[in-house]
Image (spheres, rainbow, N blue to C red):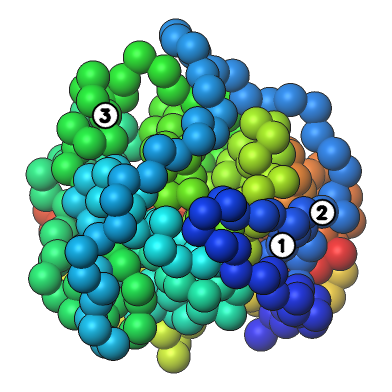
Amino acid sequence: QLKWPEPQPELPAKEAPAPVTGKSRANIPQQFLGHPIASWPVPTPSFEITAGTFSPLPKLQYARAMSSSPSPGTVQLLRTRAELSAWRRTVGKVGLVPTMGNLHSGHLELMDEAKKHADDVLATIFVNPAQFAAHEDLDKYPRTFERDLQLLSERGVSAVFAPQPEEMYPHGSPGGTVVVPTFVQGKSEDAARPHFFTGVATVCLKLFNVCDADVAVFGQKDAMQCAVISRMLQDLLLDHRLSLVIAPTSRESDGLARSSRNSYLTPGMRKNAPAIYAALSEATQAAGATPGSVRAAVRADLQRAGMQVTYVSVADPREMNEKDDGAPLANSIVSVACLLQEGELECRLIDNVVVPA
C-alpha cells in the first residue's frame, strides 16, 4: 500500500483563553498529516466574493452563558447562532468538525483527531442546500439525526451545532453573497459538479465565522474540497486565527473509502467498490509510474470492473492543475470519480491517494 509521509511533530497546545479577554490565537500552520501546507508556494489570490459586502470575521457578540452545562458523556445541542455564541464563551480551545450528518466511522475518527488539537470538540450537522444541484435530490439525502447525536455523545464531543437552513441562509440559499473558488473552476471534480465548491466554500466560511473555532478538521477523501478550504483560509486572511488539519482517508478493511454515499451501494456494488482503491494503489506504485501511465491504468482497471469513469486526475496538491503525462509523479494528488450501477440503481463514488514529494 502507498505509504503516507511521517506525520509532523504535534504542535504545542495553546493556553486556554480567559472568557473576559477573548481568545488569543497563535499562528499555527495548516497541515495535511504528513503534508505541511505551509511549505507549499504562496498562491496568487484565487477567490472572489460576489454580489454584496463582506466582513471576513465579525466579532461575535456573546450572549449570556447557558444556564446549565452538559453532564459528562452528554453532547450539548445548539440550534441557533445565539446559543452557539453563548456556549463558545464558556470553553477554551475548540476543534471544529463540519458534517452533513449520516455519520460513519470515518467521521468519528475526525472527532478523535480534533481532540488532539483542542480542549473541546464542536461538530456541526447541516445538510447544505447550496451545494446540491437541481438534479441532486436534497430531500433524499440520508438524515439520521438522533443516531448521529448518540454517536457523537459516545465519542466525547462537547457540542453539536445543528442549525435550520434559515439560520445559515437568512435570505434564502445561496444568498446574496457567495464565495467562488475560481482556481478550481473547470478542473476534475469541479468540472463534474459545477457550482458545488461555491456552495462548500460559502457554507464553510459561514461556519468558520459563527463557530469561532481554533482548529478545523477535514478528511482527505474529498481532495479538492481540502484544497479549496486551505486556499480560502489563506486568500481571505483567516489562517492567522484558524488552523486546518487534514486527516488521512478512513477506509474499510478492504480499502473502500468510508463515505455517507456508501449507504446507497447495493450488495453487488459494495462487492465491486474496493476495486477503486486497488486501482489507485497499484497504478501509483508501479515501477516508473508517470501521470500519464497512472491515468491510463486507473481508467482501464475501473472500466474492466464495470464502472463508468467520470475522470482520473493527477494534479499538484496546491493548484489542482493536471500534471503533464511525462512529468514526475511525486507530490501529486491522484483522484477519481466513477459511477457504479446495478439495474436502475446507481451510486457515484470518489477517492484519491497522495503521492508524497
Quarter occupied by the N terminus? bottom right
| Image location of residue 204, percent across then percent down | 45, 43
Q: Residue at x 82, y 54 (%)?
A: 38
C-alpha gap between disc 3 and disc 1: 30 Å
Question: Which residue bears the numbered disc 2?
Answer: 38
Which of labels 3 and 2 is toward the front?
3
Q: CA distance from mark 3 to mark 2?
A: 32 Å
Task: Tell which residue pokes out farthest to the top in this image.
Answer: 51
Identify the mark at residue 31; answer none if there is no mark. 1
| Image-quadrant location for residue 331 | bottom right
Q: Measure the C-alpha gap from mark 1 to mark 2.
A: 7 Å
Amino acid type, label 2: Ala
- Which amino acid, by three-letter code, is at mark 3? Tyr
**Which one is in front, 251 or 108?**
108
User: To which residue does mark 3 refer?
Assistant: 169
Left or right for 340, reference 79 = right
